[in-house]
Image (cartoon, grey):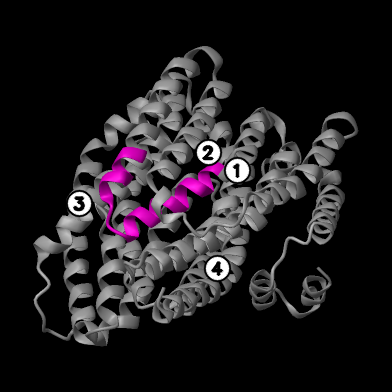
Amino acid sequence: MSSSVSDDGTERVRNIVQGVGYLTLQYVATSGLGFIFIFALIRIVPNFQYGIYSAVQVTVTIAGIIAILGLNLAATRFVALKADSDERESWYAARKILLLSLLLSGLATAFYLALSPIFSEFFAKSSGWTWAFLLGAGWVFTGSIAQTMQGVLQGRKKYARIAKILFFSRLGMVAVTLAVLFFYRSIEFALIAWVGYYAVVAIWSYLTIANSLVVSSGGLQYSTILQYSIPLGVAAIISVFSMSSDSVVVGGYLNASSLGIYQAAVQVSTVLGVIAVTPLMVAFFPEISGTQKTEAISNGVRLAFRFISLAVLPVSLLVAGVSTQLLDLFTSGGVYLRGSLTLELIGIFYIFVAIQTVLLYLLQGVGRTFGVIVIGAVAAATDIGVALLLVPHFGLAGAVSSKVAVSLDGAAVAIYICRSYMQKMDGWKFYAKAVFSSALPFIAILLLSDYYSARLITLVPYAVIFTGLYLACIKLLQLLTTEDKTYLVHVLPGPLRRVVNAL
């Protein structure tokens, strides 16, 4: 085994750790703003209106994936690959991908506009909410362009710049929207806010790279870009159906109010992805894209799985243990507490979602798009099938059952397909200790919530108890390595670094 391969793997691990550090801080802050936004929206607008907002959000998510068609990932891959060998080629690739993104986003937006009346009839059982879906078309266009721009910045490994753009744009969006919603209690302004937010992100990102994009040289062909992006786009479309079909079925078979309750629980659960998984992926994907060396890739996968075990698992189980309190906090209770089982089950099984996400990005980074499509197809078939089978009979319980089934079979298929890139994983004892360290405090908190009290006032003390038990477990079991402590010291503020040293 050559030293150059080892050095390459070590450097990529270092870049992933640093990238996660920058982006974790930003995503913690951004997720906080996102929860303030949802918290205010749910409390201010009626339940039915929030259901319509959720319907727009779900359809925009699906249409947005179609509009991007994998070009955000193509931007990251080609820009990252060419940056090390030819600076001008890297920017030339970025410019061509952005032009393709404008074209495809425009076409997808036009189709969404045409379907807006149908969406209104399906979710609201009336054409009176067509205007909301028309605003969703603007959200589709600006969102897809912004994500492609972000892909370019990821390819250039400008992690700090991405964090700055996303945080300050979201801060402005939330502040202005909440001020307007205080006087005008309508989802209209929330939808306009998303259009404006992504427009600001896209424009700001463009201004960051505008001078470099004028470079014209090289020979990267549109066909080369599309050959890479289309299979990924198809896989992403299948994947988004696997994640959203349950919500579509809830909105179609039940009503907008039930969709609002279900999506409120799902939205609360998104803190898991925003805080823990997304920052890891933003740094993980460009690093994996820049190499084809199996050892370096395996090092990255090992680090990602270690992060999932030490960060994602405890956070997700904490969310599951205090699901009722969290819904009470963010929705003011009432009918929304019907979604507590949904949030609890999502939290318990979220680790499988995280595993699947890491391995999907791995396959995208190394260009194994067929594997991505297989995983997505299995997950989509499961979600649609289980949702159609159970939602009409069991309502929201049937919908969350489909989410759980998707997380389990998707992770199993992903692990099987990616087994050749998982040769440098930590031993089973590490994962067993990690599961025990998170499961013990989870059981304690769940018992307290079920048999003592699930009132909102218990949220903070239960979180403190969970954290104390978790830290005690990882200390007694000696889970943290020097590498783990280096990451935590880089991310955490000064006073908390002493806690890390004590572990």
Task: Find residue 2 and report its image quarter.
Answer: bottom left
Kindly state the secondary structure of the residue where label 2 is placed. Answer: helix
Q: Which residues are magenta?
A: 352-375
In the rendered structure, which amino acid carries the disc numbered 2?
Tyr
Residue 257 visible in rendering: no
Residue 140 part of the magenta-drawn span = no
CA distance for labels 4 and 3: 34 Å
Number of on-image labels: 4
Kindly state the secondary structure of the residue where label 4 is placed. Answer: helix
Could you tell me residue 201's position as x and y percent? 39, 69
| Of the image marks 4 and 3, the number of the one nearer the N terminus | 4
According to the picture, the residue beneath numbered tag 2 turns out to be: 50
According to the picture, the residue beneath numbered tag 4 turns out to be: 171
CA distance for labels 3 and 1: 37 Å
In the rendered structure, which amino acid carries the disc numbered 3?
Ile
Could you tell me residue 34's position as x and y percent? 57, 56
Kindly state the secondary structure of the residue where label 1 is placed. Answer: helix
| Of the image marks 2 and 1, the number of the one nearer the N terminus | 1
Q: Residues within 10 Å of mark 3 (few under 14, many from 20)?
A: some
Could you tell me residue 163's position as x and y percent? 50, 73
